[in-house]
Amino acid sequence: MIFKYRRNGIFMEILRVISVLAILVLTGCNQSERTTDMPIDVALQKALDESIVDSGVKGVSAAIIFPDGEMWKGTSGISHEGVPVTADMLFDIGSIEKTFQATLALQLAEEGLISLDDPLEKWFPAYPNIDGKITISQLLNMTSGLDKIVEDANSPWRIGYENIDFDRVWTWEDLYNTFITEPNFEPGDKCEYSTTNYIVLKHIIEKATRSTQTVEFENRIMRPYGLKQTLVDFSKPAPESLPIVHGWCDIDADGKADDISGNSLAWLASISPMLVYSTPSDMVRWIDALFHKRTVLKAETLEAMLTFHRPVQNEPMMHGYGLGVVDINWGAFLPKWKDVKLYGHLGSQFGYSTFVGYCPELAISVSIMFNRGCDQETNRAVGTVSGAFFDVLFRRLGVKELSEQGSVSDMIKELKKSPDDVHLMYKIARMHQAKEDDYEAMLMYEEILKRDPEDKYGYRLDALFWKVSYDGLIFKKPEGLISFIADHPDYKDIQGAYKWLAKTYKRRDEIARAVEVYKEAIQKFGEDAYFLNHVAWWVFENKVESEYATAVSYAEKAIALHPEECSIWDTLAWLYFVSGRQEKAIEASAKALSLAPEDEHDFYEEQLKKIKKGR
């Protein structure tokens, strides 16, 4: 799978950041093996202290509440020059705040002030690109289809940190007029992470309570549950009793993290669903109350909160999304602990990477936060420390460890003995890909490029291809793929490069550019039936209505080149269908069924039934 870390986004926007955990670092992964004879608190602190060295992490703060209610807290590193991180320092928690917002909405539902089935039109003015039939529940579980503000090319998370107008106060009208375009899908059809849902939810909460979301959060959550090291009111300077750790981010791409503290938070407080700064200890205190003690919501409400919608589009780190809660795909970060069930949330913001979760089998609440985020080195830096920390935690709690990577682990051990063995690096990279551990594969291909600049081993071109491909999918950077296509037009998988580039532009919500990429590719591969079929299906799958006629011509040409291929007939059938040519669609689908091999007959029969029924 591909890890979709967003270099310039709120968690997910975010999230992404503890995609960070996705790294199975070659160094530091055995930290916990030397701590088995220590008390767990000492072992955890040792893991932080040892793994942070030369990791790229500036500072880290973590907290755990164990089943008996005992809390452990640990820190390492610095806030800024000469000032160490301390347990009382606050971090921007990013999209973790969505769990707070969801809880507020669920409390209002329990009190009868709102219903989760209420349509937006009951609470929200009519807007052309916002379906008034969307329910509050669909906002909460990310099934509304609302456009993604954070992903817009002109949003503060996409224009680069140095270009942000820090003093700007965004109104809802500003956000709508600047960023909101047509919905991505019909309400309820899919589950797709979009912070826009929670921006809209904020206005409903405030209208239902006739108050501000900030006041409701303070009265309903902060005070009752003892969150004394949490800050949500940014209308005035933070009190001295709430020190804020400095955030770090490589804003000029020179490979060095910059201290970005001191800028106004006006832009962020006004554009975010709810801006919250807090500590790991407050976050585990909250998660323990919500999921372990279960003192926040009624049992049936909590059950609804933990009903996860699957799959979450383009989010490999999410098994599912509930009502403000992520069923986290733990195996996407650390495969050896993939059987550990964990739900909570992740967050990232310029200068910060955060995580909080509850493990029901172990009955523990855990949070870890870093004062580095949203730059290209965050994954590597945060992954190193996170990996060491969770290795110690899970091993000491008796979790059964799966084989990390099968034979890959043995090859990694061998590579430590022979660090210049490029042949071995290439084998490891390919095995990572076979296991769909794409981030690890990318790191190994980067290492090949560094170790063999003169291509003595003959792997450099393949390594470069995969490096720029992953740059596109993970970091949404198309430049490398564009250069690769221009410089290596005869590469054995140049079609693959075009496909990766189109995927990259789709990830950037730049569908028009993706279409241009495929049109350029068709000029070269217009006699390849399977490539024509691929592009035609891509147009259908992505609902690019302006290109339906062109896609039909591609599919028809593909059939002329390869008339016995059932999958091409199926593509053509669906394109006819969405183009309003029902009889032609039925005819093409019937042809696909007649050509289908026996083991695929049921599939194509089902497609024909759908088309006949008008889907």
Image: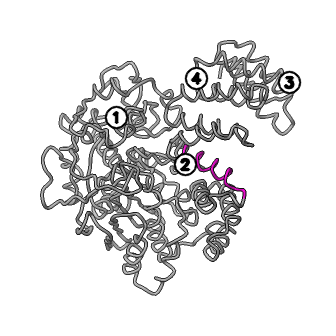
Residue at the disc numbered 1: 115
**Who's the residue at 52% across and 61% down the image?**
23
What amino acid type is highlighted by mark number 3?
A: Pro
Checking the image for residue 563, the label placed there is 3
Which circle's residue, 3 or 4, is located before the other in the chain?
Answer: 4
Mark in front: 2 vs 1: 2
Q: Quadrant of the C terminus?
A: top right
- Residue furthest to the front: 454
Q: Taking 411 as reference, is 521 above or below it?
A: above
In the foreground, 169 or 607 = 169
What amino acid type is highlighted by mark number 1?
A: Ser
Q: Could you tell me if the residues under marks 4 and 1 are in contact, i.e. CB atoms within 8 Å?
A: no
Task: Indicate whether residue 485 is drawn in magenta.
Answer: no
CA gap between label 2 and label 1 equals 31 Å
Q: In this picture, which residue range is highlighted in magenta?
A: 458-472
Label 3: state its secondary structure.
loop
Which circle's residue, 2 or 4, is located before the other in the chain?
Answer: 2
Label 1: state its secondary structure.
loop
CA gap between label 2 and label 4 equals 24 Å
What amino acid type is highlighted by mark number 2?
A: Pro
User: Residue 308, image x and y in percent?
Assistant: 49, 46
**Crowdedness near tag 4: few (<14), some (14–19) or many (≥20) residues, C-alpha within 10 Å:** some
Q: Taking 229 as reference, is 516 above or below it?
A: above
Checking the image for residue 544, the label placed there is 4
